[in-house]
Amino acid sequence: MSFNRYLDALPKGDRGESAIVGIPFDGTASFRPGSRFGPQAIRDASQSLETYSTFLDRDLHGRDYIDWGDLELAPGRVDLMLESVENVVNEVLAQELKPIILGGEHTATLGVVRSLLNKLPELVLVQLDAHADYKEDYMGDSLNHATVMRRIAELIPPERIFRIGTRSGTRKELSDAGVNVPVEESFNPRDLEGINRNIPHDLPVYVTLDLDVFDPSLMPGVGNPEPNGLTWREFIQFSRVMTYKNFVGFDVMELTPQFDPTGVSAIVAASAVRDLMLSLMQ
Ligand SMILES: [Mn+2]
C-alpha cells in the first residue's frame, strides 16, 4: 500500500507551520541510481512511526504540517529540476511555511538554497554528509551530486557552512572544503560544539541531511555508502542542538530504498524527518 502523505500531515491547501515537498529525481546519479523512489518510501515507512519522539520529548500530534506531494519532473533534466525546486520553495516561503524537502538526489539542495537566499541572505548551511560533494566538476559536468556543495559555496561564504560526518572525497576536494584529514571518527563532538557556539541565534539555519552520513550498518539504502558513519545516538545529539537554533528548514536526501530489502533504511529516514521536524517547530 502506498500512502499519499507523511505521517498525519494535512493535504495541500491547508494552513500550517511547514510544507513537505518530494523531489523524485536521480538524473545525475553516478553509481547506483534509485533515489527517485526515496520520497514515497519515506512516506510509506512513516506510517509505522509514533508522532512522539522520546528522544526529543516532543510530539507532532496536534501540530499542523502539510504534505504538498512530489514535484513532477522531466527525467534527466537537472536544470529544469533545479528551477522547479526553486519555484516550489518560493511558493512555500510565500505562504510563510518552512520547507521540508524529501529527495531524491542531493543536487536538488542547490535549488532550495537559491530560493532561501532570496529571502534570507544571511543563511547558514549545515551539511550532514559522508561526502564533501565539493568537486569542481565531475565527468566534465559542473552540476551534479558530486559538485553540488561547491556550487552552493559560490553562494554562501565558507564561514557560514558547517559540516558533520564528512569522510570521503579526493584529497584536494576535502582540503578545498576545509575537512581535516586523517578523519579518525566521522562524528567529531567538536564539530557539534562549533555549531552550538558559532552559529548566532538570530541567523537562519538550513540543514541538508545526506542519508549516507549514517553508518551503512544503519543505512545501507543509499547510492554511495561509506563505512565509519554516524550512529543514531549521534544524530539525536545534533537534533537537540538544532532545537536551540533559528532553524528554517531542512532536506533529507538520497534514500535509495531498493538497496535495503529489510526496509530499515526507509524507517530510519522517516524517523530522521520526524525528529528534524520536531526540532524545526518552535
Ligand atoms: Mn551529498
Image: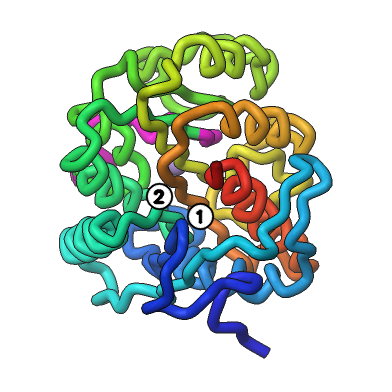
Q: For the point 78% across and 71% down, which residue is it?
A: 48
Ligand 1's image quarter is top left
| Residue at point 33%, 64% (across, down) | 27
Judging by the rendered image, the residue that carries numbered circle 2 is: 106
Q: Up-down: is 199 above or below 234?
A: above
Name the residue nearer the viewer: 22 or 206: 206
Q: Give left or right: position of 217 versus 275.
A: right
Query: Mark 2 is on which residue type?
Result: His
Question: In the rendered structure, are the residues bearing label 1 and label 2 in contact, judged by CB atoms less than 8 Å apart?
Answer: yes
Whether the residue under disc 2 has CB within 8 Å of ligand 1? yes
The residue carrying mark 1 has its beta carbon less than 8 Å from ligand 1 = yes
According to the picture, the residue beneath numbered tag 1 turns out to be: 254
Identified by mark 1, the residue type is Glu
Q: Residue at x 45, y 69 (%)?
A: 36
Query: 140 or 107: nearer the eye?
Result: 107
Query: In this picture, which residue range is highlighted in magenta?
Result: 128-141
Q: Quadrant of residue 235?
A: top right
Instruction: Say if residue 103 shows up in the picture.
Output: no
Label 1 crowding class (10 Å Cα cut-off): few <14, some 14-19, many 20+?
A: many
Q: Is residue 271 magenta?
A: no
Query: Does the magenta segment cover residue 129?
Result: yes
Q: Looking at the rendered structure, which numbered label has been put on residue 44? A: none
Residue 262 horizontal side relative to residue 68, left or right? right
Q: Residue 227: where, in percent of width, then height?
A: 69, 35
Q: On screen, 180 above or below 12?
A: above
**What is the count of numbered marks?**
2
Percent x, y of residue 282: 55, 42
Q: Nearer the viewer, residue 172 or 160?
A: 160
Q: Earlier in the sequence, mark 1 or mark 2?
A: 2
Residue reaching furthest right? Answer: 54
